[in-house]
């Protein structure tokens, strides 16, 4: 489940929310030294220990003066990804701006700038960037999934569902898309379809707290309170401070007559997120 109050990727997504690196695309015109080749590898993300090696590699390439405009677009985009991973969204956006300046037809920095906008709560700007990414590449599954999240943030669930459908048509193996559509369908009241999506998400990642949380919400809406409690408890095993799972489990316990257990869960949820009850009420569960 991904209530607006918690989604932004912790809200998502992790959010999850989806950033793509360019793999092994050639960055330099003529890499002529061991250092150049090393920096190309770093800027392409060969060292996954932290964002810092990628930032160092990309910075060295950007400062070298050896890159074509397309190479600079890739290097700035990749460094922007690393800044996004560090949650330094302003620096990330500056890099995506430079990437687009060097290659205005490159769709990745538009997608990734949209992701940074999402993280900052700039949903209209996110939509503008994601629209452009999709215009440049109509088969860009990640951009459709990210735009679906932006529509979710704006409470436009019909558009979100359509974008999730398109993302899944293009790339059915992304777990975050299945869970995103599960949650969207649950909000729209398409409970059986939502349940199938959550089951699919959990086939991909059996320890996905967000998918258990979403499925718990579906069972809660269906009146299957034991199943709801089981799924919320599973979500809490993987993410013990997930407010929506605590609150949802509390509601399910209350429906079963376990008032003391319900009160404890609901109080714990409100300690983490004071207005969590408003989110449940907004989506038809009290």
Image (cartoon, rainbow, N blue to C red):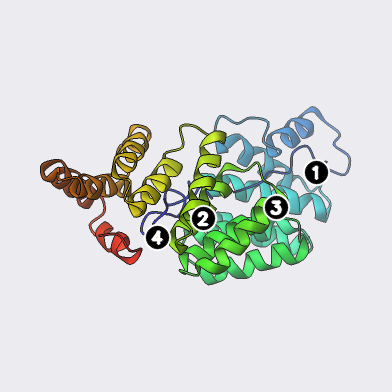
Across and down, in percent, residue 245 comes to 31, 45
Q: Give the structural element (helix, strand or loop) at label 1.
A: loop
127 or 177: which is nearer to us? Answer: 177
Q: Which residue is pictured at 74% across the width and 30% down the height?
A: 38
Q: Give the structural element (helix, strand or loop) at label 3.
A: helix
Q: Earlier in the sequence, mark 1 or mark 3?
A: 1
Q: CA distance from mark 1 to mark 3?
A: 31 Å
Apparent side of residue 267 relative to residue 52 in the rendered image (left or right): left
Label 1 or label 3, whichever lies nearer to me, is: 3
Q: Earlier in the sequence, mark 4 or mark 2?
A: 4
Q: Earlier in the sequence, mark 2 or mark 3?
A: 2
The mark found on residue 201 in the picture is none
Q: CA distance from mark 2 to mark 3?
A: 30 Å
The mark found on residue 89 in the picture is 2
Q: Which residue is mark 1?
A: 27
Apparent side of residue 279 relative to residue 125 in the rendered image (left or right): left
Q: Earlier in the sequence, mark 4 or mark 1?
A: 4
Label 3 or label 4, whichever lies nearer to me, is: 3
Across and down, in percent, residue 71 comes to 80, 49
Q: Which residue is mark 3?
A: 169
Query: Badge 3: few (under 14), some or many (20 or more) residues near its Cα, within 10 Å?
Result: few
Whether residue 83 is visible to the viewer of this picture, yes or no, is no
Label 2 or label 3, whichever lies nearer to me, is: 3
Query: Badge 2: few (under 14), some or many (20 or more) residues near its Cα, within 10 Å?
Result: many
86 or 227: which is nearer to us? Answer: 227
Query: Badge 4: few (under 14), some or many (20 or more) residues near its Cα, within 10 Å?
Result: some
Q: CA distance from mark 4 to mark 1?
A: 39 Å
The mark found on residue 4 in the picture is 4
């Amino acid at each position: 489940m991904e209530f607006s109050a918690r989604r932004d990727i912790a809200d998502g997504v992790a959010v999850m929310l989806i950033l793509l690196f360019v793999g092994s695309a050639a960055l330099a015109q003529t890499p002529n030294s061991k250092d150049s080749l090393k920096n190309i590898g770093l800027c392409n993300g060969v060292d996954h220990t932290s964002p810092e090696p990628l930032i160092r590699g990309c910075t060295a390439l950007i400062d070298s003066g050896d890159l074509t405009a397309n190479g600079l677009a890739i290097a700035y985009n990749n460094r922007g990804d690393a800044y996004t991973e560090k949650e330094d969204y302003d620096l990330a956006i500056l890099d995506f701006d430079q990437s687009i300046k060097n290659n205005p037809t490159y769709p990745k920095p538009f997608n990734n700038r949209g992701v940074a906008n999402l993280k900052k709560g700039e949903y209209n700007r996110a939509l503008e960037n994601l629209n452009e990414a999709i215009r440049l590449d109509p088969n860009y599954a990640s951009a459709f999934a990210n735009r679906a999240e932006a529509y979710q943030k704006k409470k436009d669930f019909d558009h979100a569902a359509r974008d999730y459908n398109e993302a899944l048509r293009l790339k059915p193996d992304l777990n975050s898309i299945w869970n995103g559509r599960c949650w969207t369908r649950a909000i729209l009241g398409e409970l059986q379809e939502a349940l199938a999506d959550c089951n699919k998400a959990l086939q991909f990642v059996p320890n996905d707290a967000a998918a258990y949380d979403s499925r718990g919400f579906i069972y809660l809406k269906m009146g299957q309170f034991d199943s709801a409690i089981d799924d919320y408890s599973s979500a809490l095993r993987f993410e013990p401070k997930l407010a929506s799972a605590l609150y949802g489990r509390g509601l399910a316990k209350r429906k079963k007559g376990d008032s003391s257990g319900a009160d404890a869960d609901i109080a714990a949820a409100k300690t983490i997120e004071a207005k969590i009850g408003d989110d449940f009420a907004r989506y038809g569960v009290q």
